[in-house]
Amino acid sequence: MIWKEQYIAASPEAEQNFKYMERSLDTISRTKLRLTEIERLIKKHRIIVPPLSRSTLVNMCEDGTFETAGTRPTTIGWLVFEDSFWKWVKDLDG
């Protein structure tokens, strides 16, 4: 990590800035989608026609088909991890 040492040597506050950057990169979270966005994506990309009902999507959250943030709806409803949704779409094609 020669570049790190050169960066830190460049200025007195560089080490503090570098540590802040490292902490920021460690806390990147997975993107989450609300069910309304999932409904929109299913309709837009014609993933399943006719699109799934809201109650079916909720059941998919509850039964673990979609990986969600928590085991129950948040104050803004179910939050589904985006990568989990696209994995499900890919699995539909076999």
Image (spheres, helix red, strand yellow):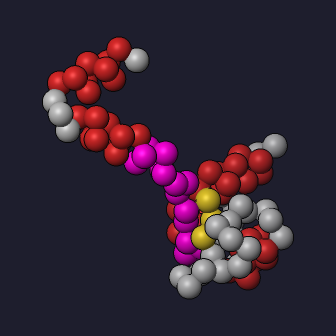
Q: Position of residue 82 (x, y in %)?
A: 59, 56
Residue in the picture at 79% in, 62% down: 65
The magenta segment is 23-36
Say whether residue 80 is magenta: no
How many marks do you count on the picture?
0
Q: Residue furthest front?
A: 12
Asked if 45 appears above or below 60 in the picture, the reply is above
Q: Quadrant of the N terminus?
A: top left
Residue in the picture at 26% in, 18% down: 6
Q: Quadrant of the C terminus?
A: top right
Q: Position of residue 70 (x, y in %)?
A: 68, 71
Q: Residue furthest bottom?
A: 75
Left or right of 32? Residue 3 is left
Residue in the picture at 36% in, 40% down: 19
Q: Position of residue 49 (x, y in %)?
A: 69, 65
Asked if 39 appears above or below 93 in the picture, the reply is below
Residue in the picture at 48% in, 51% down: 27
Say whether residue 33 is magenta: yes
Front one among 36 and 20 = 20
Front one among 56 and 77 = 77
Residue 72 visible, this orientation: yes
Asked if 70 appears above or below 55 in the picture, the reply is above
Front one among 56 and 4 = 4
Residue 39 visible, this orientation: no
Front one among 65 and 9 = 9
Left or right of 32? Residue 90 is right
Asked if 94 appears above or below 55 in the picture, the reply is above
Q: Residue furthest top?
A: 2
